[in-house]
Image (cartoon, coloured by chain):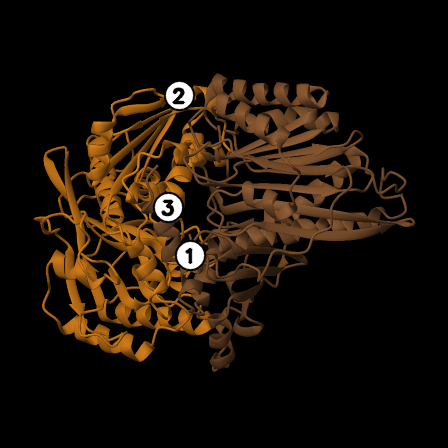
Chain colours: A brown, B orange
Amino acid sequence: MEKSPLAPASFPDLPSIAGVTLRVARARYKTWDRCDLTYVEFDEGTTVAGVTTRSKCPSPEVEWCRDALPLGRARALVVNAGNSNAFTGNRGRAAVEAIAARVAGHVGCKPSDIFISSTGVIGVPLPIDKAEEGLSAAFAAHPCGWEEAAATIMTTDTFPKAATAKAVIGDRTVNLVGIIKGSGMIAPDMATMLGYIFTDAAVDAGFLQQMLSSANRSSFSCITVDSDTSTSDTVLAFATGQAGNAPLTSFEDAGADAFNAALSDICRQLAHLVVRDGEGASKFIEIGVNGAQSNESAHKIALSIANSPLVKTAIAGEDANWGRIVMAVGKAGEPAERDKLSIRFGGVQVARDGLAVEGYDEAPVAAHLKGQEIGIEVDLGLGEGRATVWTCDFTHGYISINADYRS
Amino acid sequence: MEKSPLAPASFPDLPSIAGVTLRVARARYKTWDRCDLTYVEFDEGTTVAGVTTRSKCPSPEVEWCRDALPLGRARALVVNAGNSNAFTGNRGRAAVEAIAARVAGHVGCKPSDIFISSTGVIGVPLPIDKAEEGLSAAFAAHPCGWEEAAATIMTTDTFPKAATAKAVIGDRTVNLVGIIKGSGMIAPDMATMLGYIFTDAAVDAGFLQQMLSSANRSSFSCITVDSDTSTSDTVLAFATGQAGNAPLTSFEDAGADAFNAALSDICRQLAHLVVRDGEGASKFIEIGVNGAQSNESAHKIALSIANSPLVKTAIAGEDANWGRIVMAVGKAGEPAERDKLSIRFGGVQVARDGLAVEGYDEAPVAAHLKGQEIGIEVDLGLGEGRATVWTCDFTHGYISINADYRS
């Protein structure tokens, strides 16, 4: 698979995070010659928070993480690429339990301190023997760097994805590093969004969860590639506490706002990277909705636009087709008045008060649409509600990846 | 545009409907050499019922029809192809009023007896002068047959669509004929679903509305091509009463059940024809959901499957990818339990109780998927709720039609 045209020029420079040790190995979940098992060990005292898919049919890994998250402690993370283990009943659950037991024995901790994700083909139980072999190899391997780990969690992704941020807490500067994979919002047998954020900050697990849930609402919940939601989507944040700051427990603490801002920033960076590797994507699209009756209403309307096949194909065709935007606003089911609606492409108003702007300057709009970064703004003229979401265009590449492929 | 591979072998034989006179003319809404204005005149005494788009940004034609429908009377129908007149503010409204006034003057009736639809490019006010010229030509034209009328309401459709049904009411046999256009569930500048049903039965307008609304829920509301909802979708039913039956006013009347069944039948036939002309379609897909907690829940789950780009591309690829079905069930947000779910393709069970059926016979499934008529059945194992929806697959053709095109 060719690298997405929207990929960053290079993998970023990332700091190491004290208390986090990365290793990768070959479990050979598929007949490929690449590392496909990522093993991350955390020093004692690491706290954890997470958000998972809202699918009613989650994978056993998701169920495992949901059960372990309230305890707030983590000693290791295992990510399997090539097999999602979803929809595999008791055998899938047994594989997760076997991995947790094996790693807990190695580390010397409880199974509930182990976090596990899997991504890849659905409906095939994760082979326990391959997982065991992969883990043995990982335990024996030399520690590796972020780029290797980010590459090992990939499935159909076309480039490894990572981001970093920092914050000052009291007299300490703490670092955050995140890695993520995902190429469709979901393609259960090919992709799934898995994201991991690591920080050396000391953060209480409950407070970390509060901040991560909030950051999620303005980052991962605001991206869509194809409107399809994974059985396995998972984002976990691990805080080792080794930066030595006074532990953050609430927004009352000095530095909490700064850390929260850094966490939001890294979540948004990671979310954008997933869109930039959207299946078949040739354009990165930011959709802003203002003037809605509420923020929730604005979010629904923005996603209705972002998920519309007709809007996404119009952008692929570099066509300032604002009629399709109107259609997508109208179908969202949220309060909207045709005669108050205005629409901008790349900052240029093309429709206002329910009418085309006669004689608007088409040249800058056409030039904007030929670029890779597309901005669409809709003003509903009803209230103060606003939202921003990000998506990619819908091209022959998406059809080729998903239809010309056989499971 | 090549004719859809899913088109029927030929246009059906259709009876004439007493009290209905069809004419077509060239209004030249676009630079094309074809008839694009359809004018249907009804004898006095014709009742009417209708359902329109739920879009919050409807066209002025839709607003006009909504205002006129409660009166229950119709003397004429005008359908403009090539310009949807949607999102055109007061000028669009003025065009609708001018058409209604002109036709009412010609027929000798009130403007509210005139029904109007338009389909085509969005955001350009319907040119009143072209509409007037087209109407003058239509008034002077010889009456035409169903096939010409069905072809004249087309935009990007690849074949004219019509269906018929009949019912016995007392000692009279009544006929129903319907014509419809639509190729995307919507593409506001290229398509829109417009359907018209004509019958010589005598039916009270309120009762006709009750039956049409009910038929709509199991026909037009159960199809999707691309999940996008038109600003202009409209289905109207006209009853001239010239069959001479005792007028139907409620289900208590003899023959009402038979007529209701015929109306449901013709609505479903017409709905299927739209799917068969879905943009880029190569397969007709029926999705049945059983065992849901309610019929509404089953309907939402069925539409979640039908609208999933990943399910639709898998079918295009002739891939029995039941994992994508699980994903679509999971994302619907409706009650579902992974371990009770079973899935069939073409009648063959491929997943049961949340697990792949080991060693299921792949040959008949593969053969089924190579065909043009695809059946997917999902049983949730939770209750008695059931629903059926119809859609088409998602191919390079859809992308070509919608992205490679410029407005």
Asked whether disc 2 touches disc 3, contact meaning CB atoms under 8 Å apart, the reply is: no
Name which quarter of the figure residue B152 lies in.
bottom left
Q: Position of residue A181 (x, y in %)?
A: 55, 45
Asked whether disc 1 touches disc 2, contact meaning CB atoms under 8 Å apart, the reply is: no
Disc 3/disc 1 C-alpha distance (Å): 12 Å
Q: Position of residue B381 (x, y in %)?
A: 41, 19
Depth check, front residue: B114 or A293: A293
Q: Relative to A220, say whether B44 is above or below.
A: below
Q: Residues within 10 Å of mark 2 (few under 14, many from 20)?
A: some
Q: Is residue A162 left or right of A166 when viewed as pictured? A: left
Asked if badges 2 and 3 are on one and the same chain, I answer: no
Q: Which chain letter matches label 3?
A: A
Asked if badges 1 and 2 are on one and the same chain, I answer: no
Q: Residue at x 50, y 70 (%)?
A: A371
Q: Which mark is residue A402?
A: 3
Q: Residue at x 45, y 51 (%)?
A: A279
Disc 1/disc 2 C-alpha distance (Å): 38 Å
- Three-letter code for the amino acid on which mark 1 is drawn: Phe
Q: Residue B361, can we see it?
A: yes
- Three-letter code for the amino acid on which mark 2 is drawn: Glu
Dot 3: element: helix
Q: Residues within 10 Å of mark 1 (few under 14, many from 20)?
A: many
Disc 2/disc 3 C-alpha distance (Å): 33 Å
- Location of mark 2 (residue): B384
- Location of mark 1 (residue): A394
Q: Residue at x 33, y 57 (%)?
A: B192
